Image (cartoon, coloured by chain):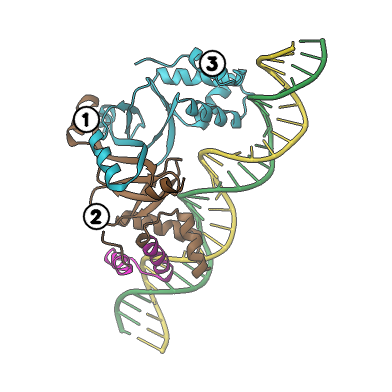
Chain colours: A cyan, B brown, C green, D yellow
Amino acid sequence: MSTLTLDQVIGAFEAAGMRATRPRRAMAAQIVTWGAADQEFSSEDLWHAVQEQAPWVGRATAYRTVQILQDFGFLDRVTFADGTERYHVISAGEHHHHLTCETCHRVVEVEACIAPEAFAAVAQASGFAISGHRVEIFGRCPTCQAAS
Amino acid sequence: MSTLTLDQVIGAFEAAGMRATRPRRAMAAQIVTWGAADQEFSSEDLWHAVQEQAPWVGRATAYRTVQILQDFGFLDRVTFADGTERYHVISAGEHHHHLTCETCHRVVEVEACIAPEAFAAVAQASGFAISGHRVEIFGRCPTCQAAS
DNA sequence: GTATTATTGAGAAGTCGTATCAGAAGATAC
DNA sequence: GTATCTTCTGATACGACTTCTCAATAATAC
């Protein structure tokens, strides 16, 4: 599980011809920390967290940065059982999906996916040109099972 | 593909000990129409559409009705590629997932799903008690492919 | 250092959904 | 038909979340 580093993010900004400004670095650092801890977050969470270190950072900037990092492919949007959406650092470049705990909202990446032949069958039956998919699995993590 | 009928919806209200009131009938009729046309909608869409026929209907009622019909199992929440969530009439009672067109937002129900043994593997590896899942497939429908 | 341009921060505004509650509408008993 | 009771409704306030605007600021190229 290769974790995301600050350098990677800053490098991506530069590679895209964007500036690695102070607010962006601060947010990237926070996100890298969360990534290492395997924690997911909302844009609002990011804003609050960054404000502790850098109170001058604006909310709009936090939302913008999350959007950019998602476009870069560093972040992944995860849907919870209750319908809320949060973000999660992608640990590797591989194909994966999410298993989320309905109680504590912990997210685990899993490899379970639809079989390629099933995709082919769907494409054939529907005539669609398939471009992407998402799989979300819900359940209760061992800790929450033990707690109840 | 058995389409939803107004009688079915009204019957469900009565069976649940609820009243099939004027606003509920109006909304059910609209939803049945959309179901026949295989169109998806948001609660807001429903409210706007019903207002053309029955301007007195309140927004809260539209949201409540959609919620109830979802609980009844007549409606299904679908996630689009852009992250928005809308509702879709379920044509049959079987287990299914969604294939949505990124261009025209048309929704098709598909049977492609994760293999049961893959679920078992995930449960075993993670320790989670799995309770549910969603699969969303994105692509372009034949019509939109031809149009480009 | 200066000019140029991307980026930012603050807050207003918009969107979307929920909660509240008095009153209306529907069901039931007589 | 009328009285009574219960559910449902509509209007609106509210809250959470997100986007937009725009002057000020910071990063970069020269």
- Of tags 1 and 2, the one toward the viewer is 2
- Using the image, determine if residue B17 lies above or below residue B123: below
Q: Are marks 3 and 2 on the same chain?
A: no
Three-letter code, disc 2: Gly
- Label 2: state its secondary structure: loop
Q: Position of residue C15 (x, y in %)?
A: 55, 48
Q: Are marks 1 and 2 on the same chain?
A: yes
Image quadrant occupied by the N terminus of chain B: bottom left
* Residue annotated with mark 1: B123
Q: Is residue A42 left or right of residue A56?
A: left
Q: Residue at x 23, y 29 (%)?
A: B122
* Residue annotated with mark 3: A10
Where residue B43 sits, quadrant-wise, is bottom left
Q: Which mark is residue B22?
A: none
Chain of residue at mark 1: B
Q: Position of residue B52 (x, y in %)?
A: 52, 67
> Who is closer to the viewer here, B105 or B74?
B105
Q: Position of residue B87 (x, y in %)?
A: 39, 52
Cα distance between the residues tagged 1 and 3: 37 Å
Magenta segment: B6-34
| Badge 2 density bin: few <14, some 14–19, many ≥20, Cα 10 Å | few
Predominant SS of the magenta segment:
helix
- Using the image, determine if residue B137 lies above or below residue A74: below
- Residue B23 located within the stretch drawn in magenta: yes
- Label 3: state its secondary structure: helix
* Residue annotated with mark 2: B93
